[in-house]
Amino acid sequence: MFKQTLLPIWSLLFGVAIITMASALQSSLIGIRASIESFNTTATGLIMSSYYIGFILGSLLVPVWVKNVGHIRVFAAVASLASVTILMQSVIVDPWFWMLMRMGTGLCYAGLFIVTESWLNAIATNNTRGRLFSIYIIEIWASQTLGQFLLNAASPSGYDLFILTSVLISMAVVPLLLVRTPSPTIEVPEKLNIMGLIKTAPLGATGAFVAGITSGAILGLGALYAKTIGLDVVEISLFIGASYLGGMVLQWPIGKLSDRQDRRLTILLVGLVGAVTALVVPFGHSVSNISIMMFGMFLLGAFTFPMYALSSSHMNDQLRPEQVLSASSGLILLNGAGGVIGPLVASVVMDLVHINALFIFIALMNLSVAVFAIHRMRVKAPMVVEEQGDHVHVGLTVTPVVAAEMLAEADSNTPSASDNHEVEIKL
């Protein structure tokens, strides 16, 4: 029974939920506190971009550490460091120091998710993997949404929320360290030729990169935007939480739609709608209607956050099974690179133009994917719908470990359409 699979791993699922809540809380807290401390928008963008630099480094380094010393030691080490980095930000309030700590936080969270996800993959079987991944992704989205409301537990101007984040990370460690499960193995991904990945599925690679830009801009600067226009802490938590909720609610139906038609058409439609809905928030601001702004954030999350999952699924349609692991790692790197660029560029634009330029920037990014999708549909014939793999539902914190397993699961359910594909990804 599936229940027999879930009960032994309750501690893993509990740990994932707590870690994700802490991550979401910390992201918004840093943005709000940066505004309170009068950091300029560009400095805040640099701080938020540093997280993705750390996450990329963690995705590359942590598998090697796990291979050398094991899951439990790595998990305990990075959890301890994650607690230290967030607490140190409450003690030393300086933009350059926060950049360094935020980079460390990204590395630590990558480690926490890699260890947890590889453990989850080791426990899953072929009969339970698909449902287990669905529960995992839903849990991630729900925890990210709930994490926003923890902003209301105390004032962002004090130490309390920093301490709360540290406590949450520590709570997540306890059950995972006590669970009696054989430590799984994890393979270190071989080096990927990114150009080979781009040649295999240009739209998939572009979509993953732009998805990093847009999600990095929204999650990195959304709380700063809300604080700057005068929203209070409760309203900020609802403002950011609405985007998570939108991504959680619509990712599944959008994914199902992409399974029933040329996936590039779905990417085109989501890009176009995402470009339009990005303008709802500044419109709500211009008419001083907070309800419109909240609805705009819901729509923005609904039609922006699913882009990475759509791009991953489109890439998977073009791959042979042996290419899945390195391709998923490459997509994560492209997405992380976009996460570095997004907050940095958007913050500069906000400083030079206007605070609402954040959403114009996001709209243009979404539109660029839609335009490129049109180009790809013109130069390459569509794949037969029956030959597409299943849509892969991906959360905002998924690492190469679980992404590879999810892509492999989708690939195993449907024959590859590229058995005779000429372009290979070089390892």
Image (cartoon, rainbow, N blue to C red):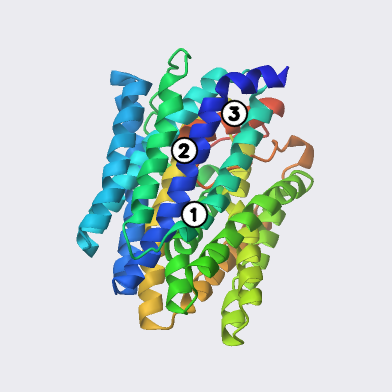
Instruction: Identify the residue position indicated by label 1 in the image.
Output: 150
**Looking at the rendering, which quadrant does residue 167 occupy?**
top left
Residue visible at 29% across and 71% down in the picture: 37
| Secondary element at image label 1 | helix
In front: 202, or 71?
71
Q: Between disc 2 and disc 1, whose residue precedes? A: 1
Type of the residue with mark 3: Ala
Query: In this view of the protein, can residue 404 be seen by the observer?
Result: no
**Disc 2 from disc 1: Cα separation:** 24 Å
Across and down, in percent, residue 156 comes to 38, 63
Mark drawn on residue 399: 2
In front: 66, or 412?
66
Instruction: Identify the residue position indicated by label 3 in the image.
Output: 408
Type of the residue with mark 1: Leu
User: For the residue carrying disc 3, how many other residues have a C-alpha within 10 Å: few (<14), some (14-19), or many (20+)?
Assistant: many
Mark whose residue sits in front, 2 or 3 = 2
**Disc 2 from disc 3: Cα separation:** 14 Å
Mark whose residue sits in front, 3 or 1 = 1
**Looking at the rendering, which quadrant does residue 19 occupy?**
top left
